[in-house]
Image (spheres, helix red, strand yellow):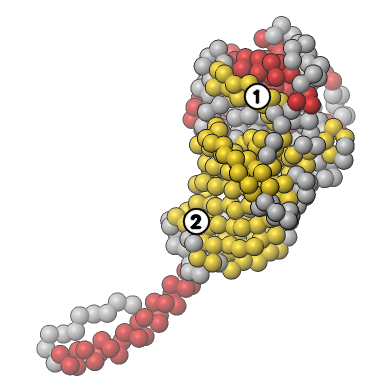
């Protein structure tokens, strides 16, 4: 309600009295309207497979992680500072945090109230946050992080925060980041990162990005009676990445650095426990990982376009759970993490993810084939380039391996459902579809499609429909029947 200018002919005293009478009511109405505009951010990002994963109402620009880890007690203490922008008028907002104890939350350096319910940390600042406003939230927390076990999504394999024989590592896909830091834990929200990790002297902390500092001192590890010698490592990740691609790994490492033949900086760290492990080429583990990572990185630069990160490499850890070796590989940003010695095609697969999955990311987890099918096609292409089976042979073998009554065909590639999002049909079946698309539109248009897809969407998140639309534009033909049959339908169709 706007106040009108008093008529000129009114006595000043009368006009002033009118203003005074109107002002309190107007102020009260404005205040009520203002309060009504602020609403809580959604407790989920709207993912069809993980309705409570991620959060609404804000967009994260940067995470600053200040972590202290004591492997003797499996204790992690942290202060995480998040810089974000409100995308609505926020009265409160949520962060994802599974387990761990929250000591304090501050918003713009003022104490904020908070409450916990499951993996949801709801933060209520003292004042509402206007849409478009940049704000900072700082969470102080700690505890013993719990590993996720028994999930059908990853076939029961442990993931998230993993305690290792000499430290720890983190493998977050799809929802493990919240086991060790509060975040907007969803692939739709990319951000830059800074890491500061303090560990007992004699251990080294590795993270995404490039090292930007190391210092020694004494730390008051929370479970110890006195300060102990410590080392602090700082890493900076300036490239946008989502939470599931973040990693911190603590232990002992043999390190090799350099550049690929094409000039991409390299950082490879191998757990000394694997130094003498047998590799496919017979080379020491650190040289094997360095060589294959460098050569596959250069191949993908030539095939798909410029490398997006400031470094390529590998983190190779002797990772175990309850004493048993683990069998994972994960495309963490810039430096994929491996739990042991892996075949060269696996290394090529994880490096291809730096283009498809990392740089061009899924908008939600239904889009997982845009990660895994593309990386699987890439490791087939790598194998062909090394003198092995051609991609065409691998695609035909995949098709012939599964008879029409095989339940393998029941998984729909473009909508595989949560518990089968990492099913073999998404990997091999999706790679087969890409190869059939290549054969349908020809090599020139197919490789132009992949390069254009990467160039247009680097640093963004995408959905399947964007890819199929682009494919039709570049092919210059209607491919809707092809995609409906091969991406969106169950069952075994005839060969195209």
Q: Position of residue 119 (x, y in %)?
A: 70, 57
Q: Is residue 29 left or right of residue 390?
A: left
Q: Secondary structure at mark 2?
A: strand
Location of residue 376 by image quarter: top right
In this view, the residue in front, 408 or 350, is 350
Q: Position of residue 222 (x, y in %)?
A: 70, 55
Q: Is residue 496 left or right of residue 457?
A: right
**Which residue lies at the image location 74% right of the left edge and 28% below the top edge?**
271
Location of residue 5 by image quarter: bottom left
Would residue 374 be visible to someone looking at this image? no
Image quadrant containing the N terminus: bottom left
Of callouts 2 and 1, the N-terminal one = 2
CA–CA distance between discs 2 and 1? 36 Å
Q: Secondary structure at mark 1?
A: strand
From this viewpoint, which residue is outermost toward the top? Answer: 387
In this view, the residue in front, 92 or 392, is 92
Task: Name the residue beneath numbered marker 1.
Answer: 255
Image quadrant containing the C terminus: top right
Q: Is residue 8 left or right of residue 77?
A: left
Q: Residues within 10 Å of mark 1 (few under 14, many from 20)?
A: some
């Amino acid at each position: 309600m706007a106040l009108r200018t008093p008529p000129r002919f009114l006595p000043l005293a009368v006009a002033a009295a009118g203003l005074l009478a109107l002002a309190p009511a107007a102020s009260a109405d404005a205040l009520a309207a203002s309060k009504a505009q602020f609403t809580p951010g959604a407790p989920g990002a709207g993912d069809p497979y993980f309705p409570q994963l991620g959060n609404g109402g804000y967009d994260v620009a940067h995470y600053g992680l200040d972590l202290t880890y004591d492997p003797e007690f499996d204790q992690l203490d942290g202060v995480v500072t998040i810089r974000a922008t409100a995308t609505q008028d926020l009265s409160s907002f949520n962060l994802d945090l599974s387990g761990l104890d929250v000591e304090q939350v501050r918003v713009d350096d003022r104490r904020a109230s908070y409450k916990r319910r499951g993996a949801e940390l709801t933060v209520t600042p003292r004042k509402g946050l206007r849409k478009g406003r940049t704000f900072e939230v700082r969470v102080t927390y700690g505890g013993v992080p719990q590993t996720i076990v028994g999930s059908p999504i990853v076939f029961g394999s442990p993931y998230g925060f993993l305690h290792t024989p000499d430290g720890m590592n983190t493998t977050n896909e799809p929802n493990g980041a919240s086991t060790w830091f509060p975040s907007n834990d969803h692939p739709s929200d990319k951000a830059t990162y800074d890491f500061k990790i303090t560990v007992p002297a004699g251990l080294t902390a590795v993270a995404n990005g490039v090292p930007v500092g190391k210092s020694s001192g004494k730390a008051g590890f929370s479970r110890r009676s006195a300060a102990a010698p410590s080392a602090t490592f700082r890493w900076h990740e300036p490239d946008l990445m989502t939470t599931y691609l973040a990693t911190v790994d603590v232990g002992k490492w043999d390190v090799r650095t350099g550049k690929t033949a094409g000039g991409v900086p390299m950082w490879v760290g191998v757990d000394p426990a694997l130094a003498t492990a047998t590799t496919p080429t017979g080379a020491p583990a650190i040289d094997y990982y360095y060589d294959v990572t460098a050569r596959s990185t250069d191949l993908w630069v030539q095939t798909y376009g410029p490398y997006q990160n400031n470094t390529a490499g590998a983190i190779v850890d002797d990772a175990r759970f309850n004493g048993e070796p683990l069998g994972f590989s994960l495309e963490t940003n810039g430096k994929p993490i491996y739990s042991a010695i892996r075949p060269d095609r696996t290394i090529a697969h994880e490096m291809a993810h730096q283009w498809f999955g990392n740089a061009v990311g899924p908008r939600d987890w239904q889009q997982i084939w845009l990660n895994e099918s593309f990386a699987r096609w890439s490791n087939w292409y790598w194998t062909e380039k090394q003198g092995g089976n051609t991609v065409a042979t691998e695609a035909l073998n995949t098709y012939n391996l599964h008879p029409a009554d095989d339940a393998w065909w029941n998984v729909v590639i473009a909508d595989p459902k949560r518990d089968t999002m990492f099913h073999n049909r998404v990997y091999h079946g999706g790679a087969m579809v890409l190869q059939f698309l290549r054969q349908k539109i020809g090599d020139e248009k197919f490789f132009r499609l992949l390069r254009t897809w990467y160039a247009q969407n680097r640093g963004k998140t995408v959905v399947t429909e964007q890819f199929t639309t682009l494919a039709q534009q570049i092919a210059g033909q209607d491919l809707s029947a092809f995609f409906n049959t091969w991406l969106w339908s169950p069952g075994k169709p005839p060969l195209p």
